[in-house]
Image (cartoon, rainbow, N blue to C red):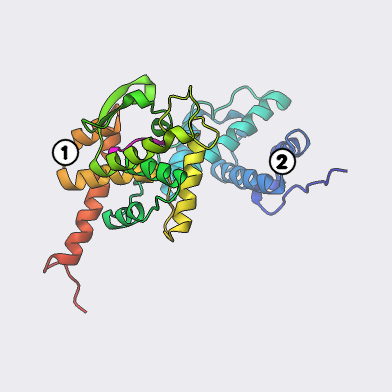
Amino acid sequence: MTESVAVPDVVPAADDVFFLHFQRHLIGEGGASAHTLSAYSRDLALLQELAAGRTYATLSPVEIRGFVRKLASRGLSGRSIARVLSAWRAFYRIMARDFSWPTNPVEGVRAPRSGKKLPAAMTTDDIGGFLDNLPDDDVLAVRDKAIFELAYSSGLRVAELTGLPLTSLDLAHGMAMVLGKGGKTRVVPVGQKAIAALEAWLSLRPTLAAETETAVFVGKGGKRLTTRAVELRLSQWRIKLGVAEPLYPHKLRHSCASHLLQSSGDLRAVQELLGHASIATTQIYTHLDFQHLAQIYDQTHPRAKKKD
């Protein structure tokens, strides 16, 4: 027997006949949980408040956009407003179906963009300590060290690491040809630490790899690794080595990019290394670089230090 879910009645929207009808739809047709119902009720309560007695069926896209501006002025993030709009959009679809409301004024209305989150990056000391402390006492550990060294050395995405074929490596000249997003290839440099780790792995690779497998990195079954397998192995090593902060493959890529930019200031070179189609994507690292600069400034500039 399915447990019934009570319609929430703790928000202003609950006494509106249309909202109640929508909530019953969510329960009856959608099988919504109490948590989902509560979230939708809060979002619809905002519509009720902002509409201020106006007829819902005749609201226009212009008015909905005005509501969006009000929500943004209250400090709601673009992500939160997008969720609210999604609830409103679903509400109007059911009203059109069940009550023949003429239009859905929320269709085509977009939430404002949220500010981009700065990429997480490790310090050079932290990432050096992590990579240098990886053991080489078994074949999988040697493989993992090669993966992580290459990710940090050359700023590769995890899918680029797992998809890398043997023929793309040119360790004699310290480079690799990478197939990136959109089928675009790029040549990236490979540092000495990564070269040494890769050479150690390649000498052991035949003990695991199937004869027909062309990928550089393979698992116990002899087939190429999945991206999920790389993520899990990195997480396991983080725990084994006692690294407190979260660690994932993209963090190695971010660390590579931010450390290069801090050292060189050459945004175009970092763009080329990462394989970004637009310089705008790479420019987020300038904010990360400024944070580093501001931190050093606060710590060292004689006129920036606060008096005790």
Mark 2: which amino acid? Ala
Image vertical order of residue 296 relative to residue 278, above or below: below
Q: Residue furthest bottom?
A: 308
Q: Is residue 153 visible?
A: no
SS class, disc 2: loop
Q: Position of residue 186 (x, y in %)?
A: 28, 25
The residue range painted magenta reads 154-158
Give amino acid for label 1. Asp
Residue 165 falls inside the magenta stretch: no
Left or right relative to 170: residue 115: right
Left or right, residue 218 beside residue 39: left
**Residue 252 picture quarter:** top left
- In what element is the residue under mark 1? loop
In the image, which disc is placed on residue 32? 2
Q: Which mark is residue 266?
A: 1
Camera-nearest residue between 236 and 197: 197
Residue 124 appears anywhere in the view: yes
